[in-house]
Amino acid sequence: MPLAGGCAQGCRMLAMAKMAVVTGASSGIAQATAVALASEGFHVLAAARRMDKLAALAAQYSGIEPVELDVTDDASV
């Protein structure tokens, strides 16, 4: 899918975007990290096996996007 405004404008916008990937984000320190980053304006890809907990987290914080992921399963990564 081409970027809006072509690469000249779209690539600059992507370079300025604050984005983070946090694994194990359904609980503990990783969840706290995802919340802290979202609170600072990051778009957070919150990854974990337990989608129910990620969905609840994403419902509370608009900057969090849940992603189902099991880092022990090559097919999942």
Image (spheres, rainbow, N blue to C red):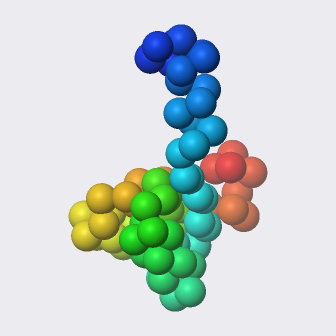
Q: Is residue 66 above or below residue 24?
A: above
Q: Which residue is drawn at the image coordinates 59% and 66% (left, top)? A: 22
* Front-lying residue, 19 or 13: 13
Name the residue furthest bottom: 28
Location of residue 34 in the rendering, given as x and y in whole percent from the top left corner: 49, 71
Left or right, 59 with reference to 36? left
Instruction: Answer with the quarter of the image where residue 9 lies.
Output: top right
Q: Which residue is drawn at the image coordinates 60% and 59% (left, top)? A: 21
Location of residue 35 in the rendering, given as x and y in whole percent from the top left corner: 43, 75
Q: Is residue 33 above or below residue 40?
A: below
* Front-lying residue, 11 or 34: 11
Left or right, 70 with reference to 42? right
Q: Which residue is drawn at the image coordinates 50% and 70% (left, top)? A: 37
* Front-lying residue, 4 or 35: 4
Q: Is residue 28 above or below residue 7?
A: below
Location of residue 60 in the rendering, given as x and y in whole percent from the top left corner: 25, 70
Left or right, 44 with reference to 15? left
Q: Taking the image as drawn, is residue 23 in sight?
A: yes
Location of residue 63 in the rendering, given as x and y in whole percent from the top left corner: 37, 58
Q: How many marks?
A: 0
